[in-house]
Image: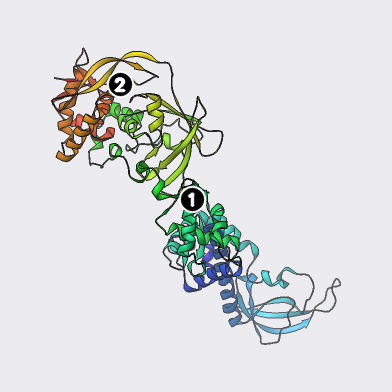
Amino acid sequence: MTVRATQTPEYWGETFTLTADDREFLLNLFVEDEQPRTTDTLARSLIQYRAQREEAAIRRKQQSQGTLYQPKRVFQTGEQVVFPALEFAVGQVVGIRDGQNPEYDHFKVIEVEIDGARREFAAEFPYDHRLNEDAAILSPAEEVVSPDDLYKRHSGRFVPHLRRLLQATPDFVWLAGQWFPRALIADVNVGQLNIAEAVLDMNGGGPLSTAAILPEVGLPREINRSLQIFSLNHALYTDGRFDEVGPAGEVLWYLVRLEPASVLTPPDRLKYEPVDYARSVLNADLLKIERTLDDEWSDVPAPEDASEDDEEITFTLTYPHRRAGTVPLSSTTSRLFPDGRTHRIRFMFEDARSGQRWPGWVVRERRYAFGLDVWFAANDVPAGAYVQLSRGDEPGIVVVDLRGLRPRREWVRVAVLRDNRLTFDMVKRQIPCDYDDQLIVLADDTAGIDKLTAQVAERGTPLNELIEQLLPELARLSPQGNVHVKTLYAALNLVRRTPPGPLFAALAAQTTFRALGDGYFLAR
Protein backbone atom coordinates (compact mmCIF):
# COMPACT_ATOMS: atom_id res chain seq x y z
CA MET A 1 0.00 0.00 0.00
CA THR A 2 1.27 3.50 -0.83
CA VAL A 3 1.96 5.42 2.39
CA ARG A 4 1.11 9.10 2.18
CA ALA A 5 3.53 11.26 4.14
CA THR A 6 0.91 14.00 4.57
CA GLN A 7 -1.23 11.57 6.57
CA THR A 8 1.35 11.30 9.38
CA PRO A 9 1.54 13.71 12.36
CA GLU A 10 5.31 14.02 11.96
CA TYR A 11 4.92 15.58 8.51
CA TRP A 12 3.26 18.70 9.99
CA GLY A 13 5.75 19.06 12.83
CA GLU A 14 9.06 20.84 13.33
CA THR A 15 10.69 19.12 10.35
CA PHE A 16 8.29 20.79 7.92
CA THR A 17 10.09 23.38 5.77
CA LEU A 18 8.88 25.86 3.17
CA THR A 19 10.09 24.98 -0.32
CA ALA A 20 10.42 27.41 -3.21
CA ASP A 21 7.31 25.74 -4.65
CA ASP A 22 5.39 26.44 -1.42
CA ARG A 23 6.42 30.10 -1.41
CA GLU A 24 5.33 30.50 -5.02
CA PHE A 25 2.00 28.88 -4.21
CA LEU A 26 1.42 31.22 -1.26
CA LEU A 27 2.47 34.28 -3.26
CA ASN A 28 -0.02 33.37 -5.99
CA LEU A 29 -2.82 33.24 -3.41
CA PHE A 30 -2.23 36.91 -2.62
CA VAL A 31 -1.83 37.92 -6.26
CA GLU A 32 -5.30 36.57 -7.05
CA ASP A 33 -7.23 38.95 -4.75
CA GLU A 34 -4.66 41.17 -2.97
CA GLN A 35 -6.20 40.34 0.42
CA PRO A 36 -4.10 39.92 3.59
CA ARG A 37 -4.47 36.52 5.21
CA THR A 38 -4.07 35.05 8.70
CA THR A 39 -1.65 32.23 9.49
CA ASP A 40 -4.62 29.90 9.96
CA THR A 41 -5.92 30.65 6.47
CA LEU A 42 -2.49 30.10 4.93
CA ALA A 43 -2.08 26.87 6.88
CA ARG A 44 -5.38 25.52 5.53
CA SER A 45 -4.41 26.39 1.97
CA LEU A 46 -0.92 24.94 2.30
CA ILE A 47 -2.17 21.68 3.81
CA GLN A 48 -4.62 21.28 0.91
CA TYR A 49 -1.89 22.12 -1.61
CA ARG A 50 0.59 19.65 -0.16
CA ALA A 51 -2.00 16.87 0.06
CA GLN A 52 -3.16 17.42 -3.53
CA ARG A 53 0.42 17.60 -4.76
CA GLU A 54 1.18 14.30 -3.07
CA GLU A 55 -1.89 12.65 -4.61
CA ALA A 56 -0.83 13.88 -8.04
CA ALA A 57 2.64 12.46 -7.53
CA ILE A 58 1.19 9.09 -6.51
CA ARG A 59 -1.06 9.13 -9.56
CA ARG A 60 1.88 9.75 -11.87
CA LYS A 61 3.92 7.03 -10.25
CA GLN A 62 1.16 4.45 -10.44
CA GLN A 63 0.27 5.35 -14.00
CA SER A 64 3.87 4.73 -14.99
CA GLN A 65 3.39 1.10 -13.92
CA GLY A 66 0.25 0.66 -15.93
CA THR A 67 -3.31 1.85 -16.54
CA LEU A 68 -5.26 2.76 -13.42
CA TYR A 69 -8.23 0.43 -13.20
CA GLN A 70 -11.72 1.87 -13.64
CA PRO A 71 -14.70 -0.28 -14.70
CA LYS A 72 -15.63 2.16 -17.50
CA ARG A 73 -12.30 1.79 -19.31
CA VAL A 74 -11.44 -0.37 -22.34
CA PHE A 75 -8.55 -2.78 -21.85
CA GLN A 76 -6.46 -4.91 -24.20
CA THR A 77 -4.96 -8.36 -23.73
CA GLY A 78 -1.41 -8.05 -22.39
CA GLU A 79 -2.03 -4.57 -20.91
CA GLN A 80 -0.58 -3.74 -17.45
CA VAL A 81 -3.30 -2.56 -15.01
CA VAL A 82 -2.90 -0.93 -11.57
CA PHE A 83 -5.63 -1.54 -8.96
CA PRO A 84 -5.71 1.25 -6.33
CA ALA A 85 -8.43 -0.50 -4.31
CA LEU A 86 -6.12 -3.55 -3.97
CA GLU A 87 -3.29 -1.55 -2.42
CA PHE A 88 -2.05 -0.63 -5.90
CA ALA A 89 -1.45 -4.21 -7.00
CA VAL A 90 -0.23 -4.55 -10.63
CA GLY A 91 -1.59 -7.25 -12.95
CA GLN A 92 -1.66 -8.20 -16.63
CA VAL A 93 -4.79 -8.71 -18.73
CA VAL A 94 -4.76 -12.33 -19.94
CA GLY A 95 -8.29 -12.65 -21.29
CA ILE A 96 -11.46 -10.73 -22.24
CA ARG A 97 -15.03 -11.99 -22.48
CA ASP A 98 -18.58 -10.65 -22.62
CA GLY A 99 -20.22 -9.92 -19.28
CA GLN A 100 -23.59 -11.36 -18.37
CA ASN A 101 -25.97 -9.56 -16.01
CA PRO A 102 -29.66 -9.04 -16.75
CA GLU A 103 -29.61 -5.65 -14.97
CA TYR A 104 -27.08 -4.16 -17.40
CA ASP A 105 -26.64 -4.05 -21.14
CA HIS A 106 -23.42 -4.98 -22.87
CA PHE A 107 -20.16 -4.80 -20.87
CA LYS A 108 -16.95 -6.84 -20.72
CA VAL A 109 -15.12 -8.90 -18.13
CA ILE A 110 -11.32 -8.92 -18.10
CA GLU A 111 -9.27 -11.73 -16.61
CA VAL A 112 -6.16 -10.40 -14.87
CA GLU A 113 -3.19 -12.29 -13.48
CA ILE A 114 -1.97 -10.74 -10.20
CA ASP A 115 0.94 -12.35 -8.32
CA GLY A 116 0.30 -15.71 -10.01
CA ALA A 117 -3.45 -15.73 -9.32
CA ARG A 118 -6.19 -14.93 -11.84
CA ARG A 119 -9.11 -12.62 -11.00
CA GLU A 120 -11.94 -11.12 -13.04
CA PHE A 121 -13.04 -7.48 -13.21
CA ALA A 122 -15.73 -5.54 -15.07
CA ALA A 123 -14.62 -3.45 -18.06
CA GLU A 124 -16.37 -1.17 -20.58
CA PHE A 125 -18.90 -0.70 -17.77
CA PRO A 126 -20.26 2.90 -18.10
CA TYR A 127 -22.83 2.61 -15.31
CA ASP A 128 -22.79 4.14 -11.83
CA HIS A 129 -19.89 2.74 -9.85
CA ARG A 130 -17.72 4.34 -7.19
CA LEU A 131 -14.49 3.45 -9.01
CA ASN A 132 -15.69 5.26 -12.12
CA GLU A 133 -15.27 8.52 -10.14
CA ASP A 134 -11.83 9.97 -10.76
CA ALA A 135 -11.56 11.19 -7.16
CA ALA A 136 -12.04 7.68 -5.82
CA ILE A 137 -9.57 5.68 -7.87
CA LEU A 138 -6.39 6.36 -5.94
CA SER A 139 -7.43 4.86 -2.61
CA PRO A 140 -10.49 3.85 -0.63
CA ALA A 141 -11.94 6.99 0.97
CA GLU A 142 -11.67 5.68 4.51
CA GLU A 143 -7.89 5.33 4.20
CA VAL A 144 -7.14 9.00 3.41
CA VAL A 145 -7.87 11.91 5.75
CA SER A 146 -9.17 14.98 3.92
CA PRO A 147 -7.17 18.24 3.97
CA ASP A 148 -9.83 19.82 6.21
CA ASP A 149 -9.48 17.00 8.72
CA LEU A 150 -5.69 17.18 8.49
CA TYR A 151 -5.97 20.85 9.49
CA LYS A 152 -8.26 20.03 12.41
CA ARG A 153 -5.89 17.33 13.66
CA HIS A 154 -2.59 19.17 13.29
CA SER A 155 -3.32 22.93 13.31
CA GLY A 156 -2.36 23.30 16.98
CA ARG A 157 1.17 22.27 16.09
CA PHE A 158 1.43 23.30 12.45
CA VAL A 159 0.05 26.85 12.61
CA PRO A 160 2.63 28.17 15.14
CA HIS A 161 5.39 26.39 13.21
CA LEU A 162 4.25 27.93 9.92
CA ARG A 163 4.15 31.36 11.58
CA ARG A 164 7.79 30.97 12.59
CA LEU A 165 8.76 29.84 9.09
CA LEU A 166 7.01 32.81 7.50
CA GLN A 167 8.60 35.22 9.97
CA ALA A 168 12.02 33.92 8.88
CA THR A 169 11.15 34.47 5.22
CA PRO A 170 11.78 37.93 3.74
CA ASP A 171 9.03 37.38 1.17
CA PHE A 172 6.21 38.00 3.67
CA VAL A 173 5.29 40.72 6.16
CA TRP A 174 3.22 40.04 9.29
CA LEU A 175 1.11 42.87 10.70
CA ALA A 176 -1.85 42.91 13.06
CA GLY A 177 -2.27 39.16 12.80
CA GLN A 178 -2.19 39.03 8.99
CA TRP A 179 0.34 38.29 6.24
CA PHE A 180 0.99 39.91 2.89
CA PRO A 181 3.83 39.65 0.34
CA ARG A 182 6.41 42.39 0.84
CA ALA A 183 6.70 42.98 -2.91
CA LEU A 184 2.97 43.75 -3.24
CA ILE A 185 2.67 46.28 -0.41
CA ALA A 186 1.64 49.71 -1.67
CA ASP A 187 4.14 52.54 -1.25
CA VAL A 188 3.40 55.15 1.44
CA ASN A 189 5.67 58.16 1.04
CA VAL A 190 7.09 60.56 3.63
CA GLY A 191 4.52 63.23 2.81
CA GLN A 192 1.67 60.83 3.48
CA LEU A 193 3.24 59.78 6.79
CA ASN A 194 3.52 63.44 7.74
CA ILE A 195 -0.20 63.77 7.10
CA ALA A 196 -0.83 60.75 9.35
CA GLU A 197 1.20 62.43 12.09
CA ALA A 198 -0.82 65.63 11.72
CA VAL A 199 -4.11 63.71 11.93
CA LEU A 200 -3.01 62.06 15.19
CA ASP A 201 -1.67 65.36 16.53
CA MET A 202 -5.06 67.01 15.95
CA ASN A 203 -6.67 64.20 17.95
CA GLY A 204 -4.48 64.61 21.01
CA GLY A 205 -1.90 62.11 19.85
CA GLY A 206 -4.43 59.29 19.44
CA PRO A 207 -5.53 56.64 19.72
CA LEU A 208 -6.95 56.35 16.21
CA SER A 209 -7.58 53.32 14.03
CA THR A 210 -5.90 52.90 10.67
CA ALA A 211 -9.29 53.21 9.01
CA ALA A 212 -9.78 56.63 10.62
CA ILE A 213 -6.39 57.89 9.40
CA LEU A 214 -6.62 56.38 5.90
CA PRO A 215 -9.02 58.87 4.22
CA GLU A 216 -6.67 61.77 4.92
CA VAL A 217 -3.54 60.02 3.64
CA GLY A 218 -4.75 59.67 0.06
CA LEU A 219 -3.53 56.29 -1.20
CA PRO A 220 -4.43 55.44 -4.85
CA ARG A 221 -8.09 54.47 -5.18
CA GLU A 222 -7.31 51.55 -7.49
CA ILE A 223 -5.74 49.75 -4.53
CA ASN A 224 -8.37 47.75 -2.65
CA ARG A 225 -9.20 48.93 0.85
CA SER A 226 -7.76 45.91 2.68
CA LEU A 227 -4.41 46.39 0.98
CA GLN A 228 -4.52 50.14 1.67
CA ILE A 229 -4.98 49.48 5.39
CA PHE A 230 -2.25 46.83 5.43
CA SER A 231 0.17 49.09 3.56
CA LEU A 232 -0.49 52.05 5.84
CA ASN A 233 -0.08 49.83 8.90
CA HIS A 234 3.27 48.65 7.53
CA ALA A 235 4.47 52.20 6.95
CA LEU A 236 3.37 53.34 10.42
CA TYR A 237 5.00 50.33 12.09
CA THR A 238 8.34 51.11 10.46
CA ASP A 239 8.28 54.81 11.36
CA GLY A 240 9.52 55.65 14.87
CA ARG A 241 7.02 58.46 15.30
CA PHE A 242 4.09 56.08 15.65
CA ASP A 243 3.22 53.50 18.28
CA GLU A 244 0.61 50.75 17.90
CA VAL A 245 -1.27 50.73 21.21
CA GLY A 246 -4.41 48.68 20.50
CA PRO A 247 -5.46 45.59 22.49
CA ALA A 248 -5.60 42.15 20.89
CA GLY A 249 -7.71 42.21 17.73
CA GLU A 250 -7.63 45.99 17.35
CA VAL A 251 -5.05 48.28 15.70
CA LEU A 252 -4.86 51.76 17.24
CA TRP A 253 -2.13 54.35 16.66
CA TYR A 254 -0.58 56.93 18.97
CA LEU A 255 2.21 59.48 18.61
CA VAL A 256 5.23 58.37 20.62
CA ARG A 257 6.20 61.95 21.52
CA LEU A 258 2.85 62.47 23.25
CA GLU A 259 2.91 59.29 25.33
CA PRO A 260 3.58 59.75 29.07
CA ALA A 261 7.24 59.50 30.08
CA SER A 262 6.39 56.72 32.57
CA VAL A 263 5.03 54.66 29.70
CA LEU A 264 8.05 55.03 27.44
CA THR A 265 10.61 54.55 30.25
CA PRO A 266 9.93 52.55 33.44
CA PRO A 267 9.92 54.78 36.54
CA ASP A 268 13.11 54.39 38.59
CA ARG A 269 11.05 53.14 41.53
CA LEU A 270 9.89 50.10 39.54
CA LYS A 271 13.21 49.07 38.03
CA TYR A 272 14.30 45.65 39.22
CA GLU A 273 17.47 43.83 38.21
CA PRO A 274 16.92 40.09 38.78
CA VAL A 275 19.35 38.41 41.16
CA ASP A 276 20.21 34.75 41.61
CA TYR A 277 19.13 33.21 44.89
CA ALA A 278 18.44 29.74 46.29
CA ARG A 279 14.67 29.17 46.35
CA SER A 280 15.32 25.82 48.00
CA VAL A 281 15.91 27.60 51.35
CA LEU A 282 12.36 29.03 51.40
CA ASN A 283 10.17 27.01 53.76
CA ALA A 284 6.44 26.49 53.40
CA ASP A 285 5.60 29.60 55.46
CA LEU A 286 7.76 31.88 53.32
CA LEU A 287 6.47 30.40 50.07
CA LYS A 288 2.89 30.97 51.22
CA ILE A 289 3.64 34.57 52.17
CA GLU A 290 5.37 35.13 48.83
CA ARG A 291 2.20 34.04 47.08
CA THR A 292 -0.03 36.33 49.16
CA LEU A 293 2.22 39.33 48.46
CA ASP A 294 1.62 38.72 44.74
CA ASP A 295 4.65 40.75 43.64
CA GLU A 296 4.80 41.17 39.86
CA TRP A 297 8.43 39.96 39.77
CA SER A 298 7.84 36.82 41.86
CA ASP A 299 6.84 34.66 38.88
CA VAL A 300 4.59 32.52 41.04
CA PRO A 301 1.33 31.12 39.64
CA ALA A 302 -1.98 32.71 40.48
CA PRO A 303 -3.91 31.26 43.43
CA GLU A 304 -5.81 28.06 42.65
CA ASP A 305 -9.15 29.78 43.18
CA ALA A 306 -8.26 32.57 40.71
CA SER A 307 -10.03 32.59 37.36
CA GLU A 308 -9.62 34.41 34.06
CA ASP A 309 -13.29 35.35 34.47
CA ASP A 310 -12.80 37.10 37.82
CA GLU A 311 -14.75 40.33 37.74
CA GLU A 312 -13.01 41.93 40.73
CA ILE A 313 -9.52 41.69 42.24
CA THR A 314 -8.05 43.40 45.31
CA PHE A 315 -4.32 44.08 45.59
CA THR A 316 -2.22 45.76 48.27
CA LEU A 317 -0.47 48.90 47.07
CA THR A 318 3.28 49.02 47.74
CA TYR A 319 5.44 52.12 48.03
CA PRO A 320 7.14 51.77 44.58
CA HIS A 321 3.78 51.64 42.81
CA ARG A 322 2.34 54.39 45.01
CA ARG A 323 5.19 56.69 43.99
CA ALA A 324 5.03 55.70 40.31
CA GLY A 325 1.23 55.89 40.02
CA THR A 326 1.06 52.33 38.73
CA VAL A 327 -0.62 48.95 39.24
CA PRO A 328 1.60 45.84 39.43
CA LEU A 329 0.81 43.37 36.66
CA SER A 330 1.13 40.20 38.70
CA SER A 331 -0.23 36.76 37.89
CA THR A 332 -3.45 37.88 39.60
CA THR A 333 -3.98 41.51 38.61
CA SER A 334 -2.83 41.22 34.99
CA ARG A 335 -5.94 39.26 34.01
CA LEU A 336 -8.14 42.36 34.34
CA PHE A 337 -6.07 44.45 31.92
CA PRO A 338 -6.18 44.41 28.11
CA ASP A 339 -3.74 42.05 26.44
CA GLY A 340 -2.20 42.28 23.00
CA ARG A 341 0.84 41.83 20.80
CA THR A 342 2.27 45.32 21.35
CA HIS A 343 4.65 46.64 24.03
CA ARG A 344 2.21 49.32 25.19
CA ILE A 345 -1.60 49.21 25.24
CA ARG A 346 -3.82 52.18 25.93
CA PHE A 347 -7.06 51.67 27.86
CA MET A 348 -9.27 53.67 30.25
CA PHE A 349 -9.44 53.74 34.04
CA GLU A 350 -12.78 54.58 35.65
CA ASP A 351 -13.39 55.84 39.18
CA ALA A 352 -15.94 53.47 40.74
CA ARG A 353 -17.58 56.27 42.73
CA SER A 354 -17.58 59.27 40.39
CA GLY A 355 -17.67 57.45 37.04
CA GLN A 356 -14.88 59.71 35.78
CA ARG A 357 -12.59 58.14 33.16
CA TRP A 358 -8.99 58.84 32.19
CA PRO A 359 -6.30 57.11 30.09
CA GLY A 360 -4.28 54.20 31.39
CA TRP A 361 -1.39 52.34 29.79
CA VAL A 362 -0.42 48.68 30.03
CA VAL A 363 3.35 48.20 29.84
CA ARG A 364 3.27 44.43 29.98
CA GLU A 365 6.95 43.75 29.27
CA ARG A 366 7.85 45.81 32.38
CA ARG A 367 4.92 44.36 34.37
CA TYR A 368 2.97 47.47 35.29
CA ALA A 369 0.01 49.59 34.22
CA PHE A 370 0.38 53.36 34.46
CA GLY A 371 -2.27 56.02 35.02
CA LEU A 372 -3.18 56.19 38.72
CA ASP A 373 -0.74 58.90 39.81
CA VAL A 374 -3.37 61.67 39.95
CA TRP A 375 -6.02 59.36 41.44
CA PHE A 376 -3.67 58.18 44.20
CA ALA A 377 -2.84 61.78 45.10
CA ALA A 378 -6.44 62.99 44.98
CA ASN A 379 -7.58 60.22 47.32
CA ASP A 380 -4.50 60.40 49.58
CA VAL A 381 -3.97 56.65 49.08
CA PRO A 382 -1.25 55.26 51.38
CA ALA A 383 1.22 52.50 50.58
CA GLY A 384 -0.40 49.40 52.11
CA ALA A 385 -3.93 50.32 51.03
CA TYR A 386 -6.30 47.72 49.60
CA VAL A 387 -7.10 48.80 46.02
CA GLN A 388 -9.96 47.16 44.16
CA LEU A 389 -9.95 46.60 40.40
CA SER A 390 -12.91 45.38 38.38
CA ARG A 391 -13.98 44.99 34.77
CA GLY A 392 -15.92 47.88 33.31
CA ASP A 393 -19.25 47.63 31.52
CA GLU A 394 -17.41 48.21 28.23
CA PRO A 395 -14.30 46.48 26.81
CA GLY A 396 -11.06 48.26 27.64
CA ILE A 397 -12.35 49.79 30.89
CA VAL A 398 -10.77 48.99 34.28
CA VAL A 399 -12.69 50.32 37.30
CA VAL A 400 -10.65 51.34 40.35
CA ASP A 401 -11.80 51.83 43.94
CA LEU A 402 -10.55 51.76 47.54
CA ARG A 403 -11.81 49.10 49.94
CA GLY A 404 -13.53 50.42 53.02
CA LEU A 405 -13.54 54.09 52.07
CA ARG A 406 -14.13 55.55 55.54
CA PRO A 407 -11.48 58.00 56.82
CA ARG A 408 -10.22 57.45 60.38
CA ARG A 409 -7.14 58.19 62.45
CA GLU A 410 -4.86 55.20 62.96
CA TRP A 411 -1.42 54.48 64.41
CA VAL A 412 0.71 53.60 61.38
CA ARG A 413 4.36 53.23 60.43
CA VAL A 414 6.07 56.33 59.06
CA ALA A 415 9.53 56.25 57.47
CA VAL A 416 11.88 58.85 58.93
CA LEU A 417 15.42 59.78 57.85
CA ARG A 418 17.89 60.29 60.69
CA ASP A 419 21.56 60.89 59.98
CA ASN A 420 21.02 59.63 56.44
CA ARG A 421 19.64 56.34 57.80
CA LEU A 422 16.14 55.01 57.33
CA THR A 423 14.26 54.63 60.62
CA PHE A 424 10.59 54.29 61.53
CA ASP A 425 8.14 55.81 63.99
CA MET A 426 4.56 54.98 64.90
CA VAL A 427 2.46 58.09 64.22
CA LYS A 428 -1.29 58.67 64.31
CA ARG A 429 -2.47 59.64 60.85
CA GLN A 430 -5.72 60.05 58.90
CA ILE A 431 -6.15 56.95 56.73
CA PRO A 432 -8.93 57.01 54.08
CA CYS A 433 -9.45 53.27 53.54
CA ASP A 434 -8.79 49.72 54.68
CA TYR A 435 -5.17 48.59 54.60
CA ASP A 436 -2.78 45.74 55.39
CA ASP A 437 -1.35 46.50 58.84
CA GLN A 438 1.87 44.61 58.03
CA LEU A 439 2.47 46.46 54.76
CA ILE A 440 1.41 50.02 55.45
CA VAL A 441 4.26 52.51 55.51
CA LEU A 442 3.99 56.26 55.01
CA ALA A 443 6.82 58.47 53.80
CA ASP A 444 6.71 62.22 54.38
CA ASP A 445 10.22 63.02 53.15
CA THR A 446 9.95 61.47 49.69
CA ALA A 447 12.78 63.62 48.33
CA GLY A 448 15.09 62.40 51.10
CA ILE A 449 14.11 58.78 50.50
CA ASP A 450 14.73 59.24 46.77
CA LYS A 451 18.22 60.53 47.58
CA LEU A 452 18.90 57.57 49.88
CA THR A 453 17.61 55.19 47.19
CA ALA A 454 20.07 56.66 44.68
CA GLN A 455 22.92 56.22 47.18
CA VAL A 456 21.99 52.59 47.80
CA ALA A 457 21.99 51.94 44.03
CA GLU A 458 25.25 53.83 43.47
CA ARG A 459 27.07 52.03 46.26
CA GLY A 460 25.58 48.66 45.37
CA THR A 461 24.67 48.06 49.01
CA PRO A 462 24.24 44.29 49.48
CA LEU A 463 20.82 42.97 50.40
CA ASN A 464 22.14 41.43 53.64
CA GLU A 465 23.46 44.80 54.76
CA LEU A 466 20.10 46.49 54.12
CA ILE A 467 18.33 43.77 56.10
CA GLU A 468 20.74 44.25 59.03
CA GLN A 469 19.98 47.99 58.99
CA LEU A 470 16.21 47.84 58.61
CA LEU A 471 15.07 44.88 60.70
CA PRO A 472 16.30 46.27 64.08
CA GLU A 473 14.72 49.65 63.25
CA LEU A 474 11.38 47.97 62.60
CA ALA A 475 11.75 45.78 65.69
CA ARG A 476 11.81 48.93 67.88
CA LEU A 477 8.13 49.44 67.00
CA SER A 478 7.10 46.07 68.43
CA PRO A 479 6.90 45.31 72.17
CA GLN A 480 8.02 41.77 71.38
CA GLY A 481 10.97 42.98 69.30
CA ASN A 482 9.94 40.91 66.29
CA VAL A 483 9.26 41.81 62.68
CA HIS A 484 7.10 40.12 60.07
CA VAL A 485 8.71 39.51 56.67
CA LYS A 486 5.88 41.40 54.96
CA THR A 487 6.78 44.50 56.94
CA LEU A 488 10.47 44.08 56.12
CA TYR A 489 9.52 43.65 52.44
CA ALA A 490 7.53 46.91 52.53
CA ALA A 491 10.36 48.80 54.26
CA LEU A 492 13.09 47.43 51.97
CA ASN A 493 11.15 48.53 48.90
CA LEU A 494 11.36 52.11 50.08
CA VAL A 495 15.02 52.16 49.04
CA ARG A 496 15.50 49.14 46.78
CA ARG A 497 13.03 47.40 44.46
CA THR A 498 13.11 43.78 45.55
CA PRO A 499 10.49 41.02 45.22
CA PRO A 500 9.96 38.68 48.19
CA GLY A 501 12.04 35.75 46.90
CA PRO A 502 15.56 37.23 47.19
CA LEU A 503 14.67 38.93 50.50
CA PHE A 504 13.26 35.74 52.03
CA ALA A 505 16.22 33.68 50.83
CA ALA A 506 18.67 36.16 52.40
CA LEU A 507 16.72 36.04 55.67
CA ALA A 508 16.62 32.24 55.70
CA ALA A 509 20.38 32.03 55.14
CA GLN A 510 21.52 34.55 57.79
CA THR A 511 22.21 33.86 61.47
CA THR A 512 21.85 37.37 62.91
CA PHE A 513 18.07 37.19 63.36
CA ARG A 514 16.09 34.23 64.70
CA ALA A 515 13.10 32.82 62.81
CA LEU A 516 10.02 32.45 65.05
CA GLY A 517 7.70 30.86 62.51
CA ASP A 518 4.73 32.20 60.56
CA GLY A 519 7.04 34.74 58.90
CA TYR A 520 8.24 36.46 62.06
CA PHE A 521 11.90 37.14 62.87
CA LEU A 522 13.36 38.29 66.19
CA ALA A 523 16.06 40.91 66.37
CA ARG A 524 18.62 39.50 68.86
* Residue 15 place in picture, x, y as percent: 43, 64
Residue 195 lies, in percent from the top left, at 49, 58
**Between residues 478 and 509, which one lies in front from this camera angle?**
478
**10 Å crowding of disc 2: few (<14), some (14-19), many (20+):** some
Dot 1 or dot 2, earlier in sequence: 1
Decide which of 5, 248 is in the foreground and name it: 248
**Amino acid type shown at disc 2:** Gln
For marks 1 and 2, give the CA distance: 47 Å
Among the 4 quarters of the image, the one containing residue 494:
top left
Residue at horizontal 57%, vertical 66%? Answer: 220
Q: Which residue, given by chain and number where applicable, does mark 2 sit on?
A: 438
- Give amino acid for label 1: Leu
Nearer-the-camera pick, 357 or 178: 357
| Residue linked to disc 1 | 200
Nearer-the-camera pick, 524 or 218: 218
Residue 72 x/y as whole percent: 75, 77
Determine whether, in the image, residue 269 is placed left or right of residue 38.
left
Secondary structure at numbered mark 2: loop
Q: Inspect this view and state whether residue 472 appears.
A: yes
